[in-house]
Image (tube, grey):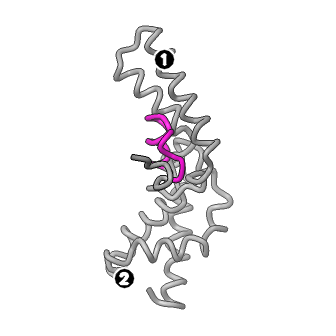
């Protein structure tokens, strides 16, 4: 049984590669189509796991270090942040069944709002900048809904 055509050659990713691919796709990261990026990250994560095991870490600790390496700088996607704003602030305006399509439609229109923020900082949500971004996105969604509706 040949699944390579079905999965467009991605069946040969390692465990870490498949995990990262799913994570990137689920959170709509731009790197989801960058096979070289995924392979490089997966290789680094596997190396981190191997080194940690050789240093005497328990398997769970080695796995935690590997996953941190795998997702470093990829904690916050534009899509996930915008989706959070829509879910939290516009639950009454955007029906649950329409939130995903609404968020996908709106994302390219608010891209410039993200441009001044460093989403690669793994501690971004703890910074005052996160609150500013959240507020700006809320305002952008209000303006969009006022102008075009849901």
Q: In the rendered image, which residue does mark 1 sit on? A: 50
Give the alpha-carbon distance from disc 2 to disc 1, as whole Å.
Answer: 49 Å
Q: Main secondary structure of the magenta part?
A: helix
Q: How many labels sit on residues?
A: 2
Within 10 Å of disc 1 (Cα), the crowding (few <14, some 14-19, many 20+) is some
Q: In the rendered image, which residue does mark 2 sit on? A: 93
> Which residues are the magenta region?
8-23
Residue 2 sits above or below residue 102 on the image: above
Q: Which residue corresponds to the image point at 48% horizontal and 33% vertical from the top-left? A: 68
Local SS, label 1: helix
Relative to 113, 46 lies left or right? left
Q: Residue 26's x, y, as percent?
A: 44, 56
Q: Residue 138's x, y, as percent?
A: 49, 72
Along the line of sight, the residue nearer the viewer: 128 or 49: 49
The numbered dot on residue 34 is none
Please report whichever mark, 2 or 1, sits nearer to the chain's N-terminal start: 1
Residue 32 lies within the magenta run:
no
Within 10 Å of disc 2 (Cα), the crowding (few <14, some 14-19, many 20+) is some
Camera-side mark, 2 or 1: 1
Q: Which residue corresponds to the image point at 51% horizontal and 15% vertical from the top-left? A: 51
Residue 22 lies within the magenta run:
yes
């Amino acid at each position: 049984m040949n699944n390579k055509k079905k999965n467009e050659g991605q069946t040969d990713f390692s465990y870490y590669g498949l995990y990262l691919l799913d994570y990137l796709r689920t959170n709509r990261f731009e790197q989801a189509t960058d096979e070289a990026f995924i392979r490089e990250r997966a290789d680094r994560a596997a190396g981190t796991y191997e080194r940690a095991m050789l240093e005497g870490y328990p398997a769970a600790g080695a796995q935690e270090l590997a996953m941190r390496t795998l997702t470093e700088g990829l904690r916050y996607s534009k899509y996930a942040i915008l989706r959070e704003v829509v879910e939290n602030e516009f639950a009454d305006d955007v029906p649950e069944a329409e939130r995903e399509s609404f968020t996908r439609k709106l994302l390219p229109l608010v891209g410039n709002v993200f441009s001044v923020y460093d989403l690669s900082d793994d501690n971004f949500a703890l910074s005052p900048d996160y609150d500013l971004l959240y507020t700006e996105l809320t305002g952008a969604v209000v303006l969009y809904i006022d102008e075009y509706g849901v």
